[in-house]
Image: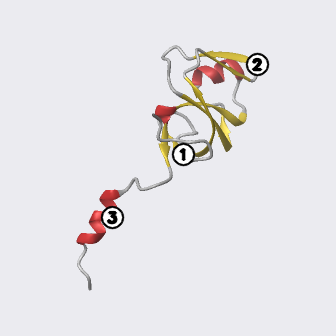
Amino acid sequence: MSQFKAGDLALLIGVGDQNNFKTVELVEFMGTPEVIHMKGFDLANTQGLRTWWVRCEDCVTPAAKIRRRMGSIVLKEFPVAEKRLIQLRGDFTPEQQKAKEAEPCL
């Protein structure tokens, strides 16, 4: 089961380009589609990755192989593999909380 839900904010990671560490909004979970239709192109999901449709205000065409086909364009929405997202809600920093508890009071 996914830790994400539509409307969540997430951080892009491991996308290997200028979109790394940009914040996106999750629009819709697409499942594991065999083919993703985007801007008149069909993109094969050959690895069967769990995929989200995301919204980003300042992202460009996400992957190098897609840029070769579509050119470098600004995209407001595009598909992203779930493994390329880091959740930006909830309690995901318990180590920092423990460190604060251990700090001496002055």
Residue 74 on image: x %, y %: 72, 36
What secondary structure is found at the residue carrying circle 3?
helix
Give whichever of discs 3 and 1 has the lower sequence position: 1
Label 1 CA crowd tier, 10 Å (few <14, some 14–19, many 20+) = many
Tag count: 3
Label 2 CA crowd tier, 10 Å (few <14, some 14–19, many 20+) = few
What secondary structure is found at the residue carrying circle 1?
strand
Query: Is 71 or 47 nearer to us in this picture?
Result: 47
Q: Is residue 102 above or below residue 86?
A: below
Give whichever of discs 3 and 2 has the lower sequence position: 2
Mark 1 vs 2: CB contact within 8 A = no
Residue tagged by mark 2?
40
As shown in the figure, which amino acid type bears the numbered disc 3? Gln
What is the CA distance from the residue labelled 3 to the residue labelled 1?
A: 21 Å
Picture disc at residue 10: 1
Picture disc at residue 49: none
Instruction: Say which residue appears at 37% left-offset and 56% top-offset.
Output: 93
Quarter of the C terminus within the rendering: bottom left
Residue 1 on image: x %, y %: 45, 34
Residue 23 on image: x %, y %: 58, 47
Residue 22 on image: x %, y %: 57, 45
Q: Quadrant of residue 30?
A: top right
Q: Quadrant of residue 96?
A: bottom left
Residue tagged by mark 3?
97
Query: Is 66 or 35 nearer to us in this picture?
Result: 35
